[in-house]
Structures are given as C-alpha cells and as structure tokens.
Amino acid sequence: MTVGLRLPFVYRDGIREVSDGHFEDGEHHGTNNIADHGSSEGIGDMSFWGQYQFFKDSKQSAALLLGMKAPTGETTNEGYKRFYNHTTGANVALPADVTSKRLETHLQPGSGSWDGMFGLAYGYDLDVVQLNTSAMYTLTTKGSQDSDLGDGFNYNFAASLPVKSFTPCANCSWNLVLEANGEWRDQEKRGSNIIIGNSGGHTVYISPGVRFISGQNWNVGTSFGYAAISDVNGDQSRPDYRVMGAFNLVI
C-alpha cells in the first residue's frame, strides 16, 4: 500500500474569450472585441490518493488506485484586463463602463468541489525498457459558482529507459520517459439543469520527459506535452502544449 497527496500550483496565461458577438464556421461576427483576461494563477485543489498493489511477480505488477480531491484551490481570480481587437491584432484599454469580473470556474486554479477518483495501474518490465499504463475516472460534484465541471477520465501510456550515466551516487539513475496522456472531460453544468455547450472534450498529449531517481526515497522530473489530438466541444480555446514538473518523496 502506498499513500500520498498532490498540491499543484496552476498558472494559465493568454486567456481570451469573445466579449460579445459569436463565431460561426470559424469566422467571428458581431464585434471585434475579445476580452483579454491575462493570467490566472494560484494554488490548485489538493488530491489524496492510495495505491494498493494486488499483484506482482518478477516482470509485472498491477495496482488499484483510489483518491479524493479537496477544494483547496483559488476560485476568485478576476479577468477582463483589456480588450484584444480582432481586426487590428492589438490590445486596447477597457472602456470606463467595463470592470474586472470573476473568471468562470473552469479558468480558476481550483474548482471548489469535492471529487472522488478510482482506477487501475499496470506495469511490465522488459529489462531494457519499462512499460506502464494507468486509467483513472473522476466523479465530480458541484463546486464554486454553482458549477459542476463534469466527470473526467484520464489514461496514460509510458515507456521509460533507465540511464546510469552522469549519476552522483551508486543507487541514482536517470529515466528518459515518453508518454501518451489522454484526458476526457464531460460537459460543464451550472445550476440545476444548464449544460454549457462550449465545454468538455478529449485531448491527447505526447509528452517526452526526464526523471532523476535517488535510490528509493525521492525523485524529481519534468515533461513537455504537445497536444497531438484536441477534440473539444463547441467554441473553446484549444491547448497547444503544457509543461509539467513533479517532486515525489517516499516516507
């Protein structure tokens, strides 16, 4: 049995959305103003998880994953920093009658909801290369601003290659990692029955990375994820890439 927690710091930049008008067939109609919200950053929601390894032999292992997400994240960030003119491509100051407003929940670092998570993980050792896969389903509840961000399904496939070169200790190693990270999210709901059409979808990242392992006690790593597939519902900002870092400590 392994237990742990994750407390992320979230930073999003370049957040924009249409302030009025609409998009149709990829063209913008009704206004040239796009609200430039700037950035949204802060402590995210803390996750507690447990991993129970119910099978293991010399080559493979399997584990059950259970977890819970607590509403510890920031949910009050404001947007509307300036307008982006669609025609000229320039930022302009806000009119005097437009003031900053609280960003919608899906743009906040935290969701304000208590969520449950469950899944499975499997690993196979090919001696030279280690293969790992996992799947996790998240059941969401209503949180900040009366919003339910929608259930989620995450799946991962990873191949890692241990490298002993340039290590500062006998038990240390580098791992070169190549991952495929899939994320599906159901549509957002607000209030009792409002479904947000421009929400949810499916994204797959191809993520090369590196991890430094110091014996059995701790490891640190980073990865760069390119959004190879981005199939989102309605009119949404599609992700281009993401950079992730992690520090893991075993006590």
Image (cartoon, helix red, strand yellow):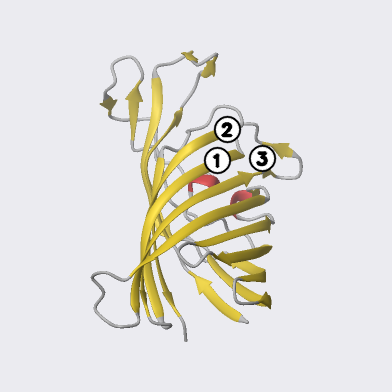
Q: Quadrant of the N terminus?
A: bottom right
Nearest to N terminus: mark 1 or mark 3: 3
Front-lying residue, 12 or 118 = 118
Mark 2 / mark 3, whichever is N-terminal: 3
Question: Which residue is drawn at the image coordinates 65% and 58% (left, top)?
Answer: 136
Are discs 1 and 3 less than 8 Å apart at CB?
no
**C-alpha gap between disc 2 and disc 3:** 13 Å
Residues at marks 1 and 3, CA–CA distance in whole angstroms: 14 Å
For label 3, the SS is: loop
Occupied quadrant, residue 160: bottom left
Q: Earlier in the sequence, mark 2 or mark 1?
A: 1
Amino acid, disc 2: Asp
Residue 151 vs 66, above or below: the answer is: above
Q: Which mark is residue 231?
A: 2
At horizontal 41% and vertical 83% (from top left) the residue drawn is 217
Position of residue 45 measured from the top left corner of the image (x, y, whole percent): 52, 63
User: In the rendered structure, which amino acid carries the disc numbered 1?
Assistant: Thr
The numbered mark at residue 203 is 1
Disc 2 crowd, CA 10 A, few/some/many (<14, 14-19, 20+): some
User: In this view, which residue lies farthest toward the bottom?
Assistant: 251
